[in-house]
Amino acid sequence: MVTAVDAADVVAKPVSAQRGGLWRYILVRLVLIIPTVFILVTVVFVLMRITGDPITAALGGRLPADQLAQRIHDAGYDRPLIVQYFDYLAGIFRGDFGTTLTDNRPVTEVLLHYGAATLELAFYALIVAFLIGIPCGLVAAYRRDRWQDAVLRTGAILAYATPIFFVGLVLKLIFSIWLGWLPANGRASTRVELQLGSVDPPTGIFLVDAIRLGSPAAVGDVLLHAVLPGLALGLLTAGIFLRLVRTNVIGTLGAQYVTSARSRGVREYRLVTKHAYRPALIPIITVIGLQIAMLLAGAVLTETTFEWKGIGFMLSEYLKARDFVAVQGIVVMIAVVVAVTNFVVDIIAAFIDPRVRY
């Protein structure tokens, strides 16, 4: 919420000083990405080595001792840990995250192939979160301390407190098994997947590929398959957005400029939807970065529940196979995505709200 004093302070500063403050803020945030990613990479590397070398973890007991020792030597896992660590860092700088042990695929290929599916799922979940969380938050603020507010706040608590896999199972039970309205699993029907395979080059995002295919039936099929996974994952963030919007709209309604508008006879509904709405969105923008991390974490359970073959689904498969090379690469990439997303969100927030950088 920007008060008159805050606005006056910002206006009073020379334009050059304001621009300098913005660029300094961007530079600092950009530099902070490096130690953040470095620490995350180091932690993941150490945790993956606590139980021993990845080859023994994945293939121990399934290969003779001499073959296992040869595989460990060929991969370099019998070298000192510090040497392995610096080799791994050098590989990351080259874009090489190693090769999976179970299916012998470059981890980078796995990330590119399945990461698009997770990105698509996160996009659907954010749409659900915005469409449900923001309007319901406005209603809760407008009907503050009434039964509508109590119902919506209770729903918000249930939305982000209920395990995602349980929400997914309930949605599948109701809309797929009992009512038969929506498909229970997958990203598209087998027929549509085969059609999307003819798109050259494929993006991996089924909705984009279906649009490029020029088939309304394929687009509809992809969207039908996305409803339940997007809803299950989006409700988690929608509950957080609802409470954020409600709290900030109520706070903005007590601001001086809103009080002045109210004294001039402006209706309460207009105060909420016109005067208090936009300032209340600033905290949501700053929180989106944190929600991306939550969405990626929730994608593991969501993709497993709905057999949505994205990076979360593959992470669970590699964990079950004890393929720690693949797990390490996927976790590091998720950490990088979260760090970069937070950087982008911070920059957007700085452009929207000058107080962030002053």
Image: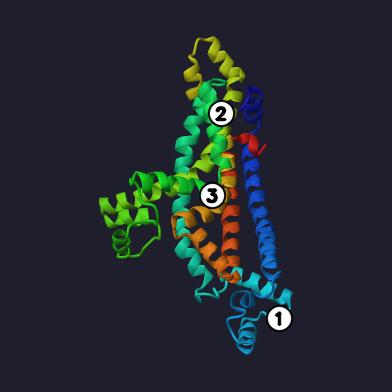
Residue at figure coordinates x 57%, y 14% from the top left: 260
Q: Residue furthest bottom?
A: 66
Contact flag, marks 1 and 3 (Cβ < 8 Å): no
Circle 1 SS class: loop
Residue located beneath label 1 in the image: 79
Residue located beneath label 2 in the image: 246
Q: Quadrant of residue 198?
A: bottom left
Reading the chain from its start, which is encountered first: label 1 or label 3? 1
Q: Position of residue 329 (x, y in %)?
A: 58, 66
Mark 1, Cα crowd under 10 Å, few <14 / some 14-19 / many 20+, is few
Q: Quadrant of the C terminus?
A: top right
Instruction: Tell me if 197 is positioned left or right of 230 in this view.
Output: left
**Residue type, label 1:** Arg
Q: Position of residue 51 (x, y in %)?
A: 69, 71
Q: Does residue 103 show up? A: yes
Residue at figure coordinates x 60%, y 62% from the top left: 332
Mark 3, Cα crowd under 10 Å, few <14 / some 14-19 / many 20+, is many
Q: Is residue 151 above or below residue 29?
A: above
Residue located beneath label 3 in the image: 295
Reading the chain from its start, which is encountered first: label 2 or label 3? 2
Mark 2, Cα crowd under 10 Å, few <14 / some 14-19 / many 20+, is many
**Residue type, label 2:** Arg
**Residue type, label 3:** Leu
Q: Is residue 229 above or below residue 117?
A: above
Circle 2 SS class: helix
Q: Position of residue 280 (x, y in %)?
A: 56, 30
Circle 3 SS class: helix
Residue at figure coordinates x 67%, y 28% from the top left: 9
